[in-house]
Amino acid sequence: MKRWVKALAATVSGLVLVGLGTLWVMPPDLLRVGTGYAAKIVCSNVFVAGRDADDVLRVDVQAPGHPLLGYVSVDVDIEEGLVTASMPFGWARSPAVHREGLGCANVPDGDLAAAKAYSAPAAGVPTADPTLPWPDGERVDTTDPRVADVLSDETLLGPGYRAVIVVKDGRIIGEAYGAGFNAETPLLGWSMTKTVNAALVGILQGQGRIDLSSRNMFATWTDEVRARITLTDLLAMESGLDFNEEYGDLADVTRMLYLEPDMAAYVEGLPSRAEPGSQFNYSSGESVLISRYWMSRFETPQAALDFPRQALFNPLGMTSAILEADAAGTFVGSSYLYATARDWARFGLLIAQRGVWKGVQLLPASYVDGMYTASGASDGAYSRAQTWRQGAGDLGNEQAGLDPATVWMRGHDGQSIAVMASQGLVVVRLGLTPSALGYEPQPLAKALSAALQ
């Protein structure tokens, strides 16, 4: 009996050790998502936004996040442009690497050399005299006192706000910044990036280089349903692809962003769950596919990587803007654009001016019309070109006391740009405000709109 007990104990101990070894070598995906997220956020904020790594880990990653994130630590190698995040004892290690002009990318397969092979024109190259008034330069004159009264109300600005910009008739007439942030701090727009990505498609359409109605977009879409998907379907979030955007512990969106070196390939491989054009399904995966598709219209990958700065950022004077690419060199057009609040406001002004910039029709007017037009399957909530027709929450524009034609760009953790073209008004609000806090930007937009009537 003693020998039998000893043998059983040894077997159990061996199985436990094997199990622990397996977990060490192949940690659960949930942990890898957590460390991947931490590595990416710290990397971008250190190398793009110039912030302190410890502060970013504590405030941006751990304070509002999943309890598991409290156990994450990061190692920052400034010389190599590398951030590695892990759980205690180096478990579930995840690297993120910085590339010139492309920001940071998660490298879940560990192939740092492949990820670092990509680059793009650097940000920060001045294109106008900084002493000129905004948007031609960076000079901002005295704040309108009506706007100052609104911006003094912390309740309207919301918890965790980092920047608010108010543009009226093409000029900044008020701005406010949270502690530790200023006009020179690049800030992440999260899903507001989708609208910028859509604008790049619009420029290509205006140049005759892309057809929104083309089918058979990807060679792997050989089945009858996916072969019928068009770029128009993707722009309206009506492709029918089976993509889960729920930001729970593990979903398609978190797997795509933090576990897949080639995000577009992951989404491209998903099956359909509905006929194209029949259902609205908000999907960051579709926005990444939009990036992959428009980038494929160029003769070389480098020409595609150069395009956003040449065609959009430089003409608008968005010198701070960094559109980040994944480890496979595809722009993460769903989520990852860093820019100062003033540069985000420049983009909002472009949309308010129906695609016109300095007298030039940068985006086709008919294409911008799609940003103002509700998509067929969204019950009026979303547009035909990657904008929202209402702010965060359940209230439509009219219910919130706003012009019914107000167009919104919205992003995770409280990012928003409200475009009220009929008033020549653009309101940018950036911050770190998890949805659980219940903040909505409509009261701020309403208060500014009323004050400037």
Image (cartoon, grey):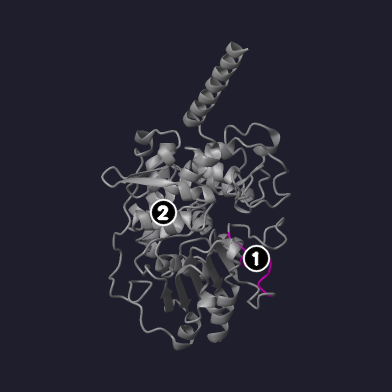
Q: Secondary structure at mark 1?
A: loop
Q: Is residue 274 visible?
A: yes
User: Which residue is rendered at x = 64% and y = 45% of the image?
Assistant: 244
Estimate the x, y position of residue 352 in percent, counting from the top left.
52, 70
Between residues 213 and 400, which one lies in front from this camera angle?
Answer: 400
Estimate the x, y position of residue 31 in percent, counting from the top left.
51, 41
Q: CA distance from mark 2 to mark 1?
A: 28 Å
> Quick one: quadrant of the N terminus?
top right
In the rendered image, the residue lying farthest to the front is 2
- Residue of label 1: 393
Estimate the x, y position of residue 378 in percent, counting from the top left.
70, 58
Is 192 located above or below residue 112 in the figure?
below
Per the rendered image, the range of residues in magenta is: 387-398
- Residue of label 2: 57
Estimate the x, y position of residue 319 in percent, counting from the top left.
34, 61
Is 278 located above or below residue 113 in the figure?
below
Between residues 436 and 254, which one lies in front from this camera angle?
Answer: 436
Between residues 263 and 414, which one lies in front from this camera angle?
Answer: 414
